[in-house]
Amino acid sequence: MEITYVIVIAIIAYIFGAITKIFIDSIPNKYIPIQNVIIGVISAIICYFTGIEPNLLQAIVLCLVATMGAGGIADLININKKEN
């Protein structure tokens, strides 16, 4: 079941990223965590209503942790690229 969370989050993140790139030219970096929270909540709702996770609170926590962790890893990669 854990891999299913990752797939759902990846699809939602890809959709949000495409919408952001198409309709919004540049979002300040300070709004990226808010976008990650929205992606996590939407992913959790999808996981709950499709039956992947029977507990809504647990789905929200798992998806929020996953999206915020992925955002942190992306920031680390970007910071590492800027330093080199």
Image (cartoon, rainbow, N blue to C red):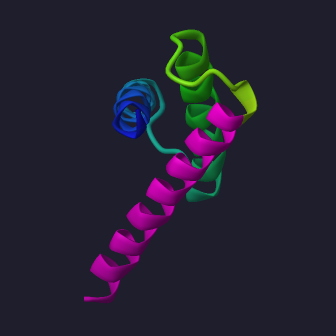
Taking the view exactly as shown, the residue that stands out farthest to the bottom is 84
In the image, taking residue 77 as reference, residue 24 lies left or right, namely right
Asked which quadrant contains residue 19, the reply is top left
Q: In which quadrant of the rendered view does residue 36 lie? A: top right
Residue at position x 41%, y 32% in the image:
1
Q: Nearer the viewer, residue 20 or 76?
A: 76
Q: Is residue 8 left or right of residue 28?
A: left
Q: Which residues are magenta?
A: 58-84
Please say whether residue 65 is one of the residues in the magenta stretch.
Answer: yes
Q: Quadrant of the C terminus?
A: bottom left
Asked whether 71 falls inside the magenta stretch, the response is: yes
Residue 30, percent from left and from top = 64, 57
- Tell me: residue 57, above or below residue 74: above
Residue 2: horizontal and vertical position, in percent? Answer: 41, 39
Q: In the picture provided, is 7 more to the left or to the right than 62?
A: left
- On the rendered structure, is 7 left or right of 29? left
Q: Is residue 25 above or below residue 45?
A: below
The prevailing secondary structure element of the residues shown in magenta is helix
What residue appears at the point 50 percent right and 21 percent down from the top-left corner? Answer: 52
Outermost residue toward the left in this view:
84
Of 44 and 27, nearer the camera is 44
| Residue in the picture at 51% in, 10% down | 50
Using the image as rendered, state which of residue 23 and residue 73 is in the foreground: 73
Q: Position of residue 75 (x, y in %)?
A: 44, 67
The quadrant holding residue 77 is bottom left
Task: Give the image location of residue 66, x and y in percent.
Answer: 51, 49
